[in-house]
Amino acid sequence: MPEKSMRDAINECLHQEMERDENVIVLGEDVAGGMGSPGGPEAIGGVFSLTAGLFTKYGEQRVIDTPISESAIVGAAAGAALAGLRPVAEIMFTDFMGLCLDPVYNQGAKFKYMFGGKAKTPMVIRTTMGAGMSAAAQHSQTNYAWLTSIPGVKCAVPSNAYDAKGLLTSAIRGEDPVMYFEHKMLYMAACEVPDESYTVPFGKGNLTREGSDVTIVAFARMVHLANEAADELVAEGISCEVIDPRTTSPLDEELILESVQQTGRLVVVDESNPRCSMASDIAGIVASQAFDYLDAPIKLVTPPHTPIPFAPNLEYAYLPSKDRIKQEVQQVMEAL
Amino acid sequence: MSKDIFPVVMPKLGMEMTEGQITKWHFKEGDALNLGAELADIETDKLSIPYEVEFEGNLKSVIAEEGVTYPVGKLLAVIAAEGVTDDQVDEFVSSYKSVEPEEVEVAEAGGGYGSAVPSSSNGAAPAQTGPQASSVSSDAVRTFIEENNLNISPIAARLAIQAGVDLSSVSGTGRLGRISVANVEAAAGGPLGRKANRVNASPVAKRLAKQKGVDLDVIQGTGPNGRILKRDVEGASAGGGLASVVQVGPARYRTEPLSGMRKAIARRLVQSKTEAPHHYLRIELHMAELMSLREGINKRLGDKKVSVNDLLVRAVGLALRDVPEANVQYADDEMRFFNQADVGVAVAVESGLITPIVKGACKKSVLQISGEIAALAEKARSGGLLPADIEGGTITLSNLGMFGIQGFDAVVNPPQGAIIAVGAVEERPANVNGLLDLAPMMHVTMSCDHRAIDGAVGAKYLAAFKDLIENPVSLVI
């Protein structure tokens, strides 16, 4: 099977879904890639090149380069979805979701419920997230927790190219609003990805490591750090099971509980700020539903409750690291 | 090359066999093997039989350890013809894929597990470079799921492989129809993996127990779900102030690993008592006629002797013929009606209990039945029973009369519909021709699986049984 980067896998998915269904449209800032530049459309290929080639192939009717207005993009997407299209909107940085929350939070998420199930909103909002490239406090956040907290919105946080393609395909073909988070630091991460279309279901987690002593739940880029920590801890005789939930809404609580019931210990690794986070959410679920299986306190590996620093050394200190994961795992192994 | 190399795998010796162990290897690596030689003894949860060599050659590699349980299809050893090198054998072993025991019903193609996952942010090595900490490797779990096309939680799959749980009739009620650990545990009849042996204690109780040197294993928890609470530990350390304290200090018992048979008894009887709603029908039989018939037969026979049990087995079989609606099994949500009467006979052996089947007991003479039971019991005690000897049957006769037991209630042996428990024949006050007098009497309890046999059917069956015993000439005509 060919290896592809997450960027190529997402681009391939967009091409295949636009080919498969003419109702699929793409809209966002510079999705045409170079509109207005001396070379014209496709000259540059978009800020992150995720939509490369779409404009040339499907034209301006279906690949809509928008003004710099997040609320216009998402508002148009929600309306297009109501009218029967399958829009894939791009918000360049998830940090800007505050500008366009209403069409997601109070409109798209509620249509089905407000109109007695008669309205569908098959809208996908692709957006980038994540720190690690010194992009400072306004272009580095991972705010999937607050979008996860909205009933009626699904959230995907793929950690690898295979899941990225499969989850995006599921999202585009589904009937509900989906927030689809792409971690900027993972765009070049490659793994085997089939050429043909396939889906990865929402709500089914993946075990990326199997182990018997500690369950580590991690999201997106944190999955890789957790895997590395788990691999190194083998030498210390500690066997970690790593769960990548893949989607935060719906969340595969069942798999997490099944694993914790076997290991008796839980460490959650989350790149988001710690308050009201996926980490605290999962800790709460496990504490209330698997209390009798715990052998140690639940540990959370998250950044501090502070904006993301710009200085590379501070940003490095801010982010969860492989070593911090190892330390927390070692601690829960020592606990009573 | 592969025709020169023969894999010895864990055989499937019966429909329900999912795992087995080698109790003894009779040869060692390098030995020459002739066809039919007894290579090893294999013990399943029901019986122990020799593995006979099916391929002539040299025993090149012994993989399975004695006393360890392996799933059906697992590579146990390799036999190779002359001229095969060790390297070739090693390559064969490392590339060998265990054959799954049987086709497993497919719930839904999952897609939940096994997707390619790079292990570093550079996107380098794939998932299989990870640690293989559990006794079943993640590769084995992945292969198992993919080959059987199962929609199953990978944790549930791992536990099912470890415990040898047959998934063919397990349906998934977990997330998106996925087979969950709870589904596998329901099929296995109890908690699996670490959950099976967990000490359920609150964190404060654990800390207190550690401080005070109290062994949590011997404390009965009084909290929800039997959770050991602070008060339970305090009670234990105060010297048994609470009734919940069983024992403090070193355990005063020895432990032995469970034999395959002990595990099977535990599993099957727990399954029976939890799944099969039992009801019990009791009668007392006049035995005078049968005792005198037996005396007459034995006088005629000379050396050979017919036991009361032989006559009872014959009666159990004939009564099944007379009341065919009781000749049933309940299994896999269907009723099975049988034409001939196959009767199980409970035989106590050194390490437990086994129930070989007398096939067609309604068509065989008492003498034939007597001979068969003797042969089966001998095979049971020497470990020579074959799968065919113990499979099937709709009813079992369990007799503790020889131990002086008056009467008892037995547990149905699934998937059979009923079990008949008989006590000793004793002189007891009874109604004899309208007068209170001493007469040889015998208690009988029929335990029925209510899913298969209702009270009225069971009563009709017992009436037929009683008639045969009290008018025993019908047993010999």
Image (cartoon, helix red, strand yellow):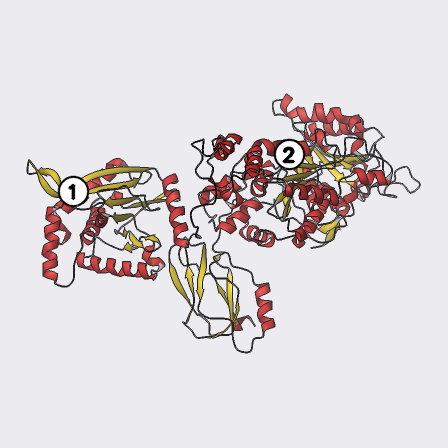
- In the image as oriented, which residue stretches furthest toward the bottom? B83
On the question of residue B257 being in view, the answer is: yes
Q: Along the line of sight, which residue is nearer the eye, A208 or A88?
A: A208
Mark 2, other Cα within 10 Å: few <14 / some 14–19 / many ≥20: many
Crowd rating for badge 1 (residues with CA inside 10 Å; few <14, some 14–19, many 20+): some
Secondary structure of residue under mark 2: helix
Residue name at image x 39 percent, y 51 percent: B262
Q: Is residue B414 left or right of residue B27?
A: left
Farthest top residue in view: A114
Q: Tag on residue A202? A: none
Give the labeled residue for mark 2.
Answer: A282
The chain carrying label 1 is B
Q: Residue at x 11, y 46 (%)?
A: B288
Q: Quadrant of the C terminus of chain A?
A: top right
Q: Quadrant of residue B298?
A: bottom left
Q: Residue under circle 1?
A: B285
Q: Chain of mark 2?
A: A
Drawn side of residue A141 relative to residue B353, left or right: right
Q: Residue furthest front?
A: B239
Residue A102 lies, in percent from the top left, at: 74, 24
Q: Position of residue B419 (x, y in %)?
A: 28, 45
Q: Where is residue A248? Give x, y as percent.
A: 67, 35
Distance in Å between CA atoms under marks 2 and 1: 65 Å
Q: Position of residue B395 (x, y in %)?
A: 28, 47
Identify the amino acid type marked 1: Leu
Horizontal arrangement in the rendering, residue B297 relative to residue B264 (left or right): left
Can residue A194 be seen in the rendering of this structure?
Answer: no
Q: Quadrant of residue A315?
A: top right
